[in-house]
Image (tube, coloured by chain):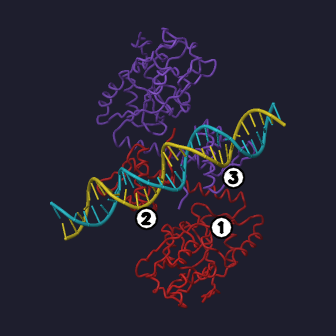
Chain colours: A red, B purple, C cyan, D yellow
Amino acid sequence: MVMDVHVRDLRYFVAVAEEQSFTRAASQRLFISQPALSKQIRQLERSLRTTLFERKGRTLRLTPAGEALLPHARRLAQDWEAALLAVSEASAQAGAMVRVGFQTRIGRGLVPAVTARMHQRLPGWKLVFRQVSWADPTVGLAQGEVDVAIAWLPMPDTGALSWRVVAREEIWVAVARGHDLAGLPMVPFADLVDEPFIALPRTAGAQRDFWLGTAARPFPAVIAGEAETAEESFEAVAAGLGITLLSAGNADIYHRDDIVCRPVSGLPPSELAVVWRTGDNRQFIDVFADVCCACSHPMAPASPASEPKA
Amino acid sequence: MVMDVHVRDLRYFVAVAEEQSFTRAASQRLFISQPALSKQIRQLERSLRTTLFERKGRTLRLTPAGEALLPHARRLAQDWEAALLAVSEASAQAGAMVRVGFQTRIGRGLVPAVTARMHQRLPGWKLVFRQVSWADPTVGLAQGEVDVAIAWLPMPDTGALSWRVVAREEIWVAVARGHDLAGLPMVPFADLVDEPFIALPRTAGAQRDFWLGTAARPFPAVIAGEAETAEESFEAVAAGLGITLLSAGNADIYHRDDIVCRPVSGLPPSELAVVWRTGDNRQFIDVFADVCCACSHPMAPASPASEPKA
DNA sequence: GCACGTCCATAACCATTGGTTATAGCAACA
DNA sequence: TGTTGCTATAACCAATGGTTATGGACGTGC
């Protein structure tokens, strides 16, 4: 009869230990409410029959039992991720599958071209495309949900991922039809900083910041809502809840009658990349990356065929 | 955004992999229903987005993904147990506590005597007594719930635990007042083999067998019920649901007006031991074991003061 | 010294989960 | 071909893990 633990609770514990705060750990690391975290840690303490944190006024410190648990908890979480990876890679290998993660439509003629080339290079192998939520900044790579990804930079800057750029496109903005900005041929980003934005989830990290134009802002963005997929985002834009930035090519790919897209000046271009886990030496990863680069046009035209519609 | 796992589900997976059967794993290893196990494994497969077992007719075999997961799952479960131990020992050390597990009342003058001696030998340390369910054959030692235990043999024969016997007592039987056997001064075990028994839980393993007199039986015991504590067991006996074996000293300790206890012939004596985890080199473990042996009378009188009451 | 703000803990609520029993479907065996 | 055994699903229900609201305690600033 064993008292088992959920790895999620170990992550909760590690986050609290590292932040030395339930509130910060909950909102900035774990994205759950503080009472939920408090409750889970209390329950873990009850089942371990010891306290893990000494709460004294506003300071939070690990008890000796907490100190003893911390390295174990870190290792268990890491080992589980390694297990996920092993399972995922075994599954892909066995099924002769390349699982390709993406968050927005790939388009740009890549999928048919890459698929054809891959069949030539690796007969019998098949591509499986998996949409991954914007909530996951690693596009499914960290947990081994996918083997490679076609994703917009930036990726998390930890060295865990590697990439090669396959397209560069300028930034456009999507607004609801009838919006003031819809009539402009090009919109300076400075005109957008006051607008409410539909943002990626906070777990998206640097990617969210990029699509909010955070680096070019004098002050933080006004967030009118969050979306985990492009479809969600455009529904919100069409409803007039806010605006969103997107790549020039996606303005075309996602064209719809109730949204108007305009180029934006004052922002660096967006970059689409083929991404993989650093150190993933499986042959098909290199093959796939090579094929993607061969099939792409990294310096795409500045403005796509999509035109504002009257 | 991580897909985390419960260590319990990893144990479920390992059990199915090793038994090559959901039904056997559920009933003989995990003590849950087979549909519950089926459901949990299916859910694990869904969240991993791969199958772990190939079901073909009546054969069950691991898929490549399942093969990849198995060593990780075993290691994670073991590492969690190591973590439990580390936490538990750190907690005990910090609190200068010896946590003593027991399943039936210790009695025999041991607790006061051992407590006094321990204060002499380890001033400032305190004994904490924790009752552990009979469901746990290691009396709380395997998961680090306790540091030592005072428990009736047999212990699981895996080498993970070590012990020294502190008392030997013949076996008695407890029956409801008014039971046919209540009038006998001594009961041959042969007269008991047809009686319905109140057993320890199946997870108790060898201990359950011992208290059913399994080794001395011509056929398996009739199980009228299970109990996780002595109190539960005696309530069931008093209600006439079945009978139970107990040590001679416990016949006295647990004396109550609605139960009659009688000595049983034909069974080996029961042995009370101080038990600890093999390899647990903490000083206070040895001290505690020494003190228990010094305070005990390993060759207790064959019959205790308890007499059958008219 | 008091008011305010911040942090953690608990209450109430609710959707989801993990167990049960009943039973369906399928395959192996006699 | 009928029976048996195993896995999967349905229906049910208690427990869990999240939310918001809020209370209590403590630190800070005036």
Can you identify the residue that label 3 sits on? Answer: B64
The chain letter for the residue carrying disc 3 is: B
Label 2 and label 1: CA atoms lie apart by 29 Å
Note whether A130 is above or below B252 in the view shown.
below
Residue type beneath disc 1: Val
Asked whether the residues under marks 2 and 1 belong to the same chain, the reply is yes
| Residue closer to the observer: B256 or A104 | B256
Residue type beneath disc 2: Gln
Label 2 and label 3: CA atoms lie apart by 37 Å
* Residue B214 falls left or right of residue A75: right
| Residue closer to the observer: B227 or B167 | B227
| Residue closer to the observer: A239 or A138 | A239
Location of residue B254 (image quadrant)? top left
Tell me the tag on residue B98. Answer: none
Residue type beneath disc 3: Pro
| Residue closer to the observer: B106 or B118 | B106
- For the point 50% across and 54% down, the residue is A8
Q: Position of residue D26 (x, y in %)?
A: 26, 56
Q: Quadrant of the C terminus of chain A?
A: bottom right
Tell me the tag on residue A28. Answer: 2
